[in-house]
Image: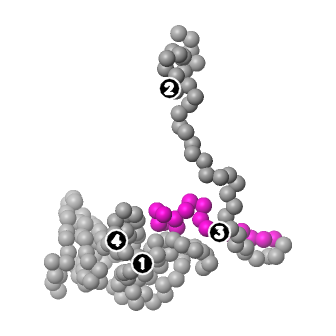
Amino acid sequence: MAIDTSKVDALINAPGQCVISSSLESLVELISYLSSCGFEQLVDIFGIDYLEREKRIEVVYLLLDLKNNRRCCVKVCVDPVSEKVPTCCGIFSVANWFEREVYDMYGVVFESHPDLRRILTDYGFEGFPMLKDFPLTGYKEVRYDLESKEVVYEKVDLSQDYRSFDSLTPWEGAGHLNLPLDGKKE
């Protein structure tokens, strides 16, 4: 089995390790090829959000060759709004869980995935929490109500309005006074 190298860009970082950038079209073929070359374990699939890029999500596959102590990292860039990543569940069954996690945290859709649904957040959760433009407080607060004996979703109520915190102390900028700032007298 040979790989079309025009669709693949490889960088060798250190002995026993490599990083490969792939296109969406050749991803499954590349993962299958690496599996046949001894990379028999898929350690993880995760996403990285590069907010400034057009294809802002980088999906990373970590593969391991236990016999020869080699690692391979396969990267593919995707726009989660308009593109789908082909699933690798047919090559590695553990990809099922990893792809669900990437979907749940980043919103990346894996095409032909057998059971693509949320795995870490609640089914009513709105948005994707690992995206850099996701608000720190979220959109809704989830709590269990003892009286009604059910989970209740409420709009997040911030106890304080947005404030700009000035990191300068009142004493900084008053250098002309020649005050000791460490509490000792000169």
Occupied quadrant, residue 146: bottom right
Q: Position of residue 105 (x, y in %)?
A: 49, 71
Sequence-wise first label, 2 or 4: 4
Badge 4 crowding class, 10 Å Cα cut-off, few under 14, some 14 to 19, many 20 or more, is some
**Distance between mark 2 and mark 4 Cα atoms:** 44 Å
Badge 2 crowding class, 10 Å Cα cut-off, few under 14, some 14 to 19, many 20 or more, is few
| Above or below, comparing residue 78 to residue 50 in the picture | below
Q: Residue at x 48, y 63 (%)?
A: 133
Disc 4 target residue:
55
**Distance between mark 2 and mark 1 Cα atoms:** 48 Å
| Magenta residues (range) | 129-146
**Distance between mark 4 and mark 1 Cα atoms:** 9 Å
Pointer 4 and pointer 1: residues touching (CB < 8 Å)?
A: no
Residue type, label 2 = Gly
Q: Which mark is residue 140?
A: 3
Disc 2 target residue:
173
Q: Position of residue 162 (x, y in %)?
A: 61, 52
Q: Please, what secondary structure does the residue beneath circle 4 have?
A: loop
Q: Position of residue 147 (x, y in %)?
A: 84, 72
**Which residue lies most toward the top here?**
186
**Distance between mark 3 and mark 2 Cα atoms:** 42 Å
Disc 1 target residue:
81
Sequence-wise first label, 1 or 3: 1
Residue type, label 3 = Lys
**Distance between mark 3 and mark 4 Cα atoms:** 28 Å
Sequence-wise first label, 3 or 2: 3
